Image (cartoon, rainbow, N blue to C red):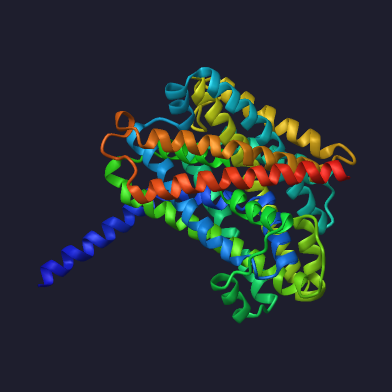
Amino acid sequence: MAVIEQIKQHKVVRNFLLFLAVLGPGIITGSVDNDAGGITTYSVAGAIYGYRLLWTLIPSFLVLVIVQEMNARMGIVTGKGLADLIRENFGVKITFFIFVGLVIADIGNTATEFAGVAGSMSIFGISKYLSVPIVAIAVWILVTKGNYKITERIFLLFSFCLLSYIVSALMAKPDWGQVGLGFIKPELEVNRDYLTMVLGIVGTTIAPWMQFYMQSAVIEKGIKIGDYRFALWDVIVGCVATVVVAMFIIIACAATLHENHVVINEAKDAAVTLKPFAGAFAGQVFAFGLFVASVFSATILPLATAFYVCEAFGFEAGVDKQIREAPHFYSLFAFIVVVAIFIILIPGAPLIAITIWSQVLNAVLLPVVLISMIRMVNNKKIMGEHVNNKFQNIVGWSTTVILIALTALLIGSTIMSWVKS
């Protein structure tokens, strides 16, 4: 019996070490989801609706796990990135038009991340004309001088730092009974503002560029089909971390801003207005989380864009390659970062409009990406025996249909609000 127990213990240790070796793509992709735009969405949701929108995190979690698992599985089985597969199966023309939209949206998203850097540092008295260029230089050095292992470890550290939002929420002293009711007893409203906020929460959890990054990261990590179950746990842990952070951001703002009828427009406002209600430290911790999330996403977003564009059109890509080995990859990365910085440093730049437009474009493109993914992951010529099961297809197609309907609602309501204004 002692020998059997030793074998079991060795197996547990071996499996844990294998999990640590595979750990990375799922956690990083899930954590980067809580970027400046996501934090703003969750903060506004908590400030306006209190705990009433916490229920949206449950379907968001389910959909996120299903979608990210599809990406990981496709990357492991095919050894190809999502962009590469889209080009091979749907043609160069369709790929080109999809990616033009994605690049434009990602430039806007990257500008939003640097706006998060500027906003969070302004709380500590640092001007955006100093903080944004310094962060941009640090991002460039990390991507061009680091290798995949070093970069991944730094990203994992960033992911861990996002848990600082738990501190802000606890210091806000929320009503845990109301928190529970927010999950199990949703108060539904049928109006434009409520439905738009629901779409914002679900949509910010599943951005189009994330799907491309996830698959590329799995390939760059070199994960094989024999390690699939560990990759799945990596995805699940990443999704749990994403939803936990989102939950505590909503709770922190619900317990303070909503209770005191404070209206905010961006995440920086939440950090500033938390101070009188939960203490200066809570506001500073919230600002620190915003800074980390913004730097994190300002690195990953242009990196993901450069990855999938180069994959789609056959150019060399990867942080393990030198600039001379992958000139198109690094040139596109630099172009997106420089344009985003230029936008942020323009005095009086319409940052809220940029954020809205980029999120609307994300919402338009996401169903296109999901339809492409679901069709390919069910193709036995591509996936062999590793195609979707019925449950995965039900969730995948249902999500796509719901997102198309909500996207139409968001676009329609956005146009109407602009017409009225």
Please indicate, yes or no, whether residue 355 appears anywhere in the rendered image: no
Q: Is 269 placed above or below 50 here? A: above
Whole-percent x and y of residue 53?
A: 63, 65
Residue placed most toward the observer, 166 or 175: 175
Q: Residue furthest front?
A: 190
Q: Position of residue 263 (x, y in %)?
A: 82, 63
Image quarter of the C terminus: top right
* Percent coordinates x, y for residue 288 in the rendering: 70, 59
The residue positioned 84% from the left and 56% from the top of the image is 125
The quarter in which the N terminus is drawn is bottom left
Quick check: 245 left or right of 86?
right
Front residue of 313 and 27: 313
Total of numbered circles in the picture? Answer: 0
Residue in the image at 30% along x and 46% along y: 227
Can you give x and y, in whole percent of width and height, for residue 312 in the image?
50, 24
Point 67% across, 29% down: residue? 334
Residue at the image position 32 percent from the left and 40 percent from the top: 387
